[in-house]
Amino acid sequence: MKKALMITAIIAIVAIAGSLLYYYVFFRTGIEKAEVRLQEQNLELEKIKQSAEEEEKNIRQQGLVKCLDNADKEYSRRLLENYQAYSDSWNAECKRLNLPVNSSLPKESAERIEKELDDGYERITKDYESKKNDCFKFWQD
């Protein structure tokens, strides 16, 4: 009986030792390797996500710059057109009154033409501010 008990104890110790060996050498290291691979994949995904966010930010920034540049160009063009219309109106009024081009006009004619210039400037500036705001709304949201 003692011998059977000893053999059973030895078998149990060998089985426990084998189980511990398997757990620490194979199973546990496999889990740790899987965790390391998972962390590496998470880091790679984070880098990809960050790169995509930076790319989107660059695209939005370039779009905003282009949109604002277009608004500035249109603003400048419209201001020049407004001034040209003012100059043409002034000269037409001079011609109508039989005065030399770019002459001084009577007060009421000059005020009317200058009011048209000022009204055009206000309208153009209001449109320009609206377009700039639209650019910021579209490209920064």
Image: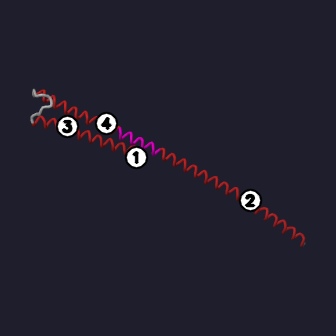
Residue 75: horizontal and vertical position, in percent? Answer: 29, 38
Q: Is mark 3 on a helix, strand or loop?
A: helix
Disc sitting over residue 74 in the figure: 4
Q: Mark 2 points at which residue?
A: 25
Q: Earlier in the sequence, mark 2 or mark 1?
A: 2
* Amino acid found under the numbered disc labelled 4: Glu
Near-viewer residue (9 or 24): 24
User: According to the image, label 3 marks what residue?
Assistant: 117
The kind of residue on which mark 2 rests is Val
Q: Distance between the residues labelled 4 and 3?
A: 17 Å
57 lies left or right of 28 = left
| Position in image of residue 36 (x %, y %) | 64, 55
Mark nearest the camera among 4 and 1 is: 4
Distance of label 1 from label 3 (alpha carbons): 34 Å
Nearer-N-terminus badge (4/3):
4
CB of mark 2 within 8 Å of CB of mark 1?
Answer: no
Neighbours of disc 3 within 10 Å: few (<14), some (14-19), many (20+): many
Identify the residue position indicated by label 1 in the image. 140
**In magenta stretch: residue 47:** no
Quadrant containing the N terminus is bottom right
Q: Position of residue 29 (x, y in %)?
A: 70, 58
